[in-house]
């Protein structure tokens, strides 16, 4: 525990911050230095109970609030986040150690976009209707009335904390649900700040609650009888636990889980554009994005050029103080996560990897050496049966593997238990479409990566998830339809 508590990150229940309890808290660690920034108030079961009860109470009137009013509130929230933009950036950078330029351009920028997009989407949404003709002369009108799911538990990870949280909270609120949010124990601050912003723009007390803590708090929440559905982003292992927690009460879940994503690079690809895109897809957020590429399949004819180009780009990354504009690459999130990634580095060596670049812990000087830094790393010499090519590592690392033809490339890319994302790099238009469609993933990109339209479906196959969110898919998950059939 810190000698002097610089600040408390508090829970937010029924429209107000709760008083921290000195005995139930944990340190909020700066991943860039290892220093303690403050303390986080861990919720106990009584506080989670209160959060769910307040959400249930608030649900009754929020669910009946006209859609236009809910959409207007979401737009005010977007405006207010932009007014307090730098506070969100500072909180996100402190919790995660990510480069400030990335926090501004990606993480925090997406929060108001999420609120505005779902305000637009919900305002434009219609209801499906069908005229039934039975064949014996009867006719009927069928239409579905979509009702809010109810009280939704929103459980999110630490890699893109505000982006992923608002991606779920915006549609949940737009559809008239009340939420109890459980941010990652590693990154509690922006969720807490968001609670304040939502209260400032007039969200009724109890509609948005935040409870902090580790997995046990999440598990208690998902088992709670007052929860009507769970939307979860995190690892596949935790996803299976959440699934069994809700199973006895048969509640809907939406899962955005892990990935072991492939890039497939054909011999006709534009080299510079492809190398820039590949480097971004491997190293963004120090490889800690579910969509990051960890397997790069390259046509034999250009294997050396791609390998050399990627080595050059990995070597040009700037690891440094997250608040410096020049920094491109931050640390990993925690000591435990770095230990895990380093174990994979050792395993790769035993599995026969040839190290192209990186592979260890950098020396960044006294100020930063207490942080959880790791070198951007590339391997060759591994095959698809290596554990390091099969399991998600979630660090700045990829294995480069050669292929000879299109069918082999598709087979290699699809040879995985995961199915989140893939990217295909080629100048052959027809092959681009063909291969992108053949990927068994939720999102398949051609000549780009992580380019998102928030109206399109997002999610994964296999171990990578269940269901889709985004656009109409979000409206479907966060509502429950009642079909009305009227004989005409
Ligand atoms: P994690 O599964 O360890 O934790 C995610 C959240 O679940 C945290 O808030 C954690 O406290 C909570 N939790 C832990 N145990 C729980 C339990 N038994 N019941 C309920 N909640 C519990 O994941 P992480 O390490 O925080 O995040 C990294 C993982 O998230 C990676 O696997 C990554 O691929 C995945 N991810 C997926 C997406 C996607 O959209 N598919 C996006 C980002 C991250």
Image: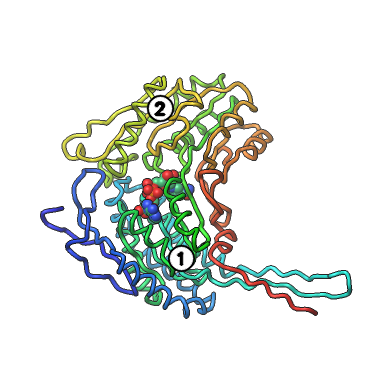
Q: Is residue 27 left or right of residue 449?
A: left
Q: Is mark 1 within 8 Å of ligand 1?
A: no
Q: Report helix, strand or loop for mark 1.
A: strand
Q: Residue at x 57, y 70 (%)?
A: 123
Q: Residue furthest front?
A: 248
**Residue 307 at x, y percent in the picture:** 46, 23
* Nearer to the camera, 232 or 454: 232
* Nearer to the camera, 146 or 317: 146
**Residue 183 at x, y percent in the picture:** 36, 57
Compared with 13, 410 (above or below) is above
Compared with 279, 150 (above or below) is below
Q: Is residue 10 left or right of residue 470?
A: left
Q: Residue at x 23, y 53 (%)?
A: 28
Q: What is the distance, in whole Å, between disc 2 and disc 1 at their CAs?
A: 40 Å
Q: Residues within 10 Å of mark 2 (few under 14, many from 20)?
A: many
Among the 4 quarters of the image, the one containing residue 82: bottom left
Among the 4 quarters of the image, the one containing residue 484: bottom right
Q: Residue furthest right?
A: 136
Residue 400 in sight from this viewpoint? yes
Q: Report helix, strand or loop for mark 2.
A: strand
**Residue 172 at x, y percent in the picture:** 49, 66
Q: Which mark is residue 414?
A: none
Q: Residues within 10 Å of mark 1 (few under 14, many from 20)?
A: many
Report which residue position mark 1 lands on.
Answer: 152
Q: Is mark 2 within 8 Å of ligand 1?
A: no
Residue 104 in sight from this viewpoint? no
Q: Is residue 86 left or right of residue 26?
A: right
Q: Residue at x 67, y 36 (%)?
A: 434
Compared with 241, 478 (above or below) is below
Report which residue position mark 2 lands on.
Answer: 378
Choose the circle earlier in sequence order: 2 or 1: 1
């Amino acid at each position: 525990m810190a000698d002097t508590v610089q600040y408390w990150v508090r829970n937010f229940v029924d429209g107000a911050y709760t008083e921290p309890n000195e005995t139930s808290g944990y340190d909020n660690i700066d991943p860039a230095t290892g220093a303690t920034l403050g303390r986080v108030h861990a919720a106990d079961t009584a506080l989670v109970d209160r959060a769910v009860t307040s959400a249930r109470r608030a649900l009754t009137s929020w669910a009946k609030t006209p859609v236009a009013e809910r959409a207007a509130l979401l737009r005010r929230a977007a405006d207010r986040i932009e007014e307090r933009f730098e506070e969100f950036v500072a909180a996100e950078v402190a919790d995660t150690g990510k480069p400030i330029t990335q926090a501004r351009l990606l993480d925090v920028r997406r929060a108001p976009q999420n609120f505005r997009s779902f305000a637009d989407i919900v305002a434009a949404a219609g209801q499906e209707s069908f005229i039934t003709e039975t064949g014996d002369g009867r006719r009927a009108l069928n239409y579905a009335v979509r009702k809010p799911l109810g009280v939704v538990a929103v459980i999110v990870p630490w890699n893109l904390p505000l982006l992923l949280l608002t991606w779920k909270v915006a549609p949940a609120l737009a559809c008239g649900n009340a939420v109890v949010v459980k941010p990652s124990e590693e990154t509690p601050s922006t969720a807490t700040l968001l609670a304040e912003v939502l209260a400032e723009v007039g969200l009724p007390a109890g509609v948005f609650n935040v409870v902090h803590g580790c997995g046990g708090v999440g598990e208690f929440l998902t088992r709670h009888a007052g929860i009507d559905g769970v939307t979860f982003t995190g690892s596949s292992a935790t996803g299976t636990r959440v699934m069994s927690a809700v199973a006895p009460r048969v509640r809907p879940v939406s899962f955005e889980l892990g990935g072991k994503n492939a890039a497939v690079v054909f011999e006709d690809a534009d080299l510079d554009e492809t190398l820039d895109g590949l480097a971004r897809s491997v190293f963004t957020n120090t490889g800690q994005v579910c969509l990051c590429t960890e397997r790069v399949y390259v046509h034999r004819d250009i294997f050396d050029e791609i390998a050399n180009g990627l080595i050059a780009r990995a070597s040009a990354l700037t690891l440094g103080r997250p608040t410096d504009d020049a920094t491109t690459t931050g640390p990993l999130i925690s000591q435990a996560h770095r230990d895990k990634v380093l174990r994979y580095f050792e395993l790769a060596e035993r599995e026969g990897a040839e190290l192209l670049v990186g592979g260890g812990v950098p020396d960044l000087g006294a100020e930063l050496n207490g942080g959880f830094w790791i070198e951007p790393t590339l391997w060759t010499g591994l095959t698809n049966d290596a554990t390091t090519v099969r399991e998600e590592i979630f660090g700045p690392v990829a294995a480069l593997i050669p292929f000879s033809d299109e069918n082999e490339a598709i087979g290699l890319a699809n040879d995985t238990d995961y199915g989140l994302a893939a990217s295909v790099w080629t100048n052959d238009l027809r092959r681009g479409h063909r291969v992108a469609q053949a990927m068994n993933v939720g999102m398949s990109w051609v000549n780009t990566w992580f380019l998102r339209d928030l109206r399109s479906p997002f999610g994964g196959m296999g171990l990578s998830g269940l269901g889709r969110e985004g656009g109409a898919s979000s409206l479907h998950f966060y509502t429950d339809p009642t079909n009305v059939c009227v004989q005409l």
